[in-house]
Image: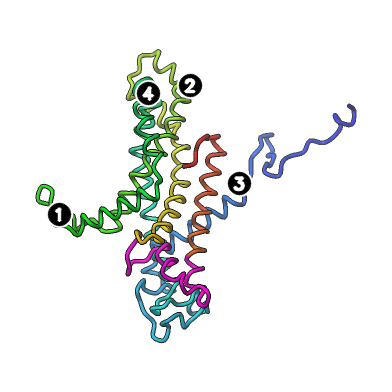
Amino acid sequence: MTDLLAAPSVVPEAAVTVDDGRTRRRLPLGLWFGIAWLVVATFHAYMASRLPWVRGENQRVEGAGRYRIGPSADFWFGSDKLGKDVFARCVYGAKLSITLASVSIVVGLVLGGSLGMIAGYFKGWVDRALAIVIDSLLAFPALVVAALLIGRFDVLQASDIQVAGFGFEWLTRRWSIAIVFSLLSIAPVARIVRAQTLSLSEREYVLAARSLGARTPRILFREILPNLVPAMVSVLFTGIALLLAAEGALAFLGYSIKAPDASWGLMINEARVDIDQYWWATIMPAAMLFMTVLAFNLIGDWVAKRFDIREAAI
């Protein structure tokens, strides 16, 4: 017993004691990697046209056709079968892939989050009715539904159908993927937000607001919504990671972005038949996709652990 009392306390590696006695936790290395990678990737993606070391998305270089140039000082990721710079296409593909995933998950957060808050706060028959709808949507294989809807949208775009005098020529693959991903994000987000709202609606500050006669909109938007932000941030990052991977899966089924536009999934699918001889055209965009998905997941997982968020994965 004396030895135990005399033994010095051990401070965990992830914590640092400051002068006033408080304990400050160090941010994990994985989080720093995720932040750094996303900063570099998004900077290149959205500033590509102004960066001197990034060629044009569809710029062909003489003598670079049929994968004739491998990774080098001039071609960092080599060239593809059409003589285009794989690094430049990865950069422009990052902009398209990240934008589609980000817009889709934000729409899913707004719509799914609203449904989840309503179900978790009102409970009763409202909760049961929305739960049936959400569980029904989650029962369908997401990838199959996405391929089916995108295929129908392609037919609709090519048709002469008009609604109120407007056709569907605008319904390109970009719009189709954004719409489908947004729809598929609603049910998982609603389920997560519902679980968080059920817990928050029983907290002391919510009960106090009710007892003081606060109206439902005020309770939802002033008391519950601010406390849902950490869960939504976690879902935002993990959702983007999932949708990035989903876009790559759709490319293998032929339902992703169409050439000459570039996306990571499309680049991997186009070059995979030549991977034995010209590995860089497949491995480089696959590595970019992997690192970006990993970075989003690392940040989302840290947020979930930091705020003790349960069911924060889609």
208 or 64: nearer the viewer: 64
Q: The residue tagged with tag 4: helix, strand or loop?
A: helix
Provide the residue designation for mark 1: 167
Residue 53 location, quadrant: bottom left
- The residue that disc 3 covers is 27
| Mark found first going from the N terminus, 1 or 4 | 1
Residue 294 included in the magenta stretch of the image = no
Q: Which residue is mark 2?
A: 203
Q: How is the image coloured?
A: rainbow
Marks 3 and 2, the one that precedes in the sequence: 3
Q: How many marks?
A: 4
Q: Nearer the viewer, residue 143 or 54?
A: 143
C-alpha distance separating marks 2 and 1: 50 Å
Give neighbour class at mark 4: few <14, some 14-19, many 20+ (Cα, 10 Å): some
Apparent side of residue 144 relative to residue 158 in the rendered image (left or right) = right
Q: Which residue is mark 4?
A: 219
Q: Marks 4 and 2, how far apart in space?
A: 12 Å
Magenta stretch, residue numbers = 257-285
Q: Is residue 264 above or below residue 141?
A: below
Residue 19 spot, x, y in % from top left: 69, 38
